[in-house]
């Protein structure tokens, strides 16, 4: 059984490599390389896998899952600059792919300790672009 919790956050970022010129960054990363930052209204879907507990009827208590996502992720990234202010994105290219991998790494253990397994982290950056990470 899979169960999914949705959370939202707004954050600023810039896609760039320090070792490339602004021109080269713009060529590869396009508008997302604007040196003056820009933001997205991200949507995060965390999907957890497990058996339905006979006592609760739950795979995981959604209140607990929501709490994990909020304390480990949302409080750290909502209304923040992902390049400058978020410890788990430090020294990474702030692509949607890397955001999804970092979120996976931040919450995987907590979900395991609550008796379920992390199945998918989906990060929606725009209406048309999203990534799904399944741990590899
Ligand atoms: Ni962008």
Image: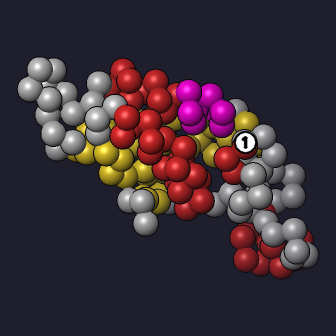
In the rendering, at what x and y percent does residue 77 appear?
66, 37
Give the main secondary structure of the magenta stretch.
Answer: helix
Residue 34 in which image quadrant:
bottom right
Q: In this view, does 120 lie above or below 80?
A: below
Q: Residue furthest left?
A: 54
Image quarter of residue 50: top left
Residue extending farthest right: 21
For residue 84: magenta? no
Q: Up-down: is 135 above or below 68?
A: below
Against 119, residue 64 (above or below) is above
| Residue ID at (45%, 42%) | 109
Return the residue nearer the eye: 33 or 89: 89
Label 1 Cα neighbours within 10 Å, binned few <14 / some 14-19 / many ≥20: some
In this rendering, is residue 69 above or below 90? above
Q: Position of residue 63 (x, y in %)?
A: 36, 21
Colour mapping used in the image: secondary structure
Left/right of residue 76 with respect to residue 22 in the rendered view: left
Queried on whether the Cβ of the residue with tag 1 lies below 8 angstroms from ligand 1, the answer reads no
| 136 to the left or right of 78 | left
Residue at 15% across, 39% down:
51
The N terminus lies in which quarter of the figure?
top left
Q: Nearer the viewer, residue 123 or 127?
A: 123
Task: Please name the residue shown 37% across and 52% down the image.
Answer: 120
Highlighted magenta segment, given as a residue range: 71-78
Residue 126 at least partly seen: no
In the rendered structure, the answer to whether residue 110 lies left or right of residue 38 reads left
Residue 118 visible in image: yes
Instruction: Name the element at disc 1.
Output: loop
Q: Residue at x 87, y 76 (%)?
A: 20
Q: Quadrant of the C terminus?
A: bottom left
Question: Nearest the camera: 99 or 24?
Answer: 99
Q: Which residue, given by chain and number where applicable, does mark 1 sit on?
A: 86
């Amino acid at each position: 059984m899979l169960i999914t919790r949705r959370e939202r956050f707004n954050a600023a970022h810039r896609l760039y490599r320090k070792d490339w010129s602004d021109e080269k960054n713009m060529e590869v990363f396009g508008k997302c390389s604007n040196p003056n930052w820009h933001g997205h209204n991200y949507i995060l879907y965390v999907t957890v896998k497990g058996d339905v507990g006979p006592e609760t009827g739950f795979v995981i208590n959604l209140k607990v899952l929501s709490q994990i996502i909020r304390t480990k992720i949302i409080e750290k990234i909502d209304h923040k600059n992902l390049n400058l202010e978020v410890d788990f994105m430090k020294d990474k290219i702030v692509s949607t792919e890397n955001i999804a991998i970092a979120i996976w790494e931040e919450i995987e253990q907590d979900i395991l300790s609550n008796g379920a397994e992390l199945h998918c982290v989906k990060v929606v950056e725009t209406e048309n672009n999203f990534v799904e990470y399944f741990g590899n």
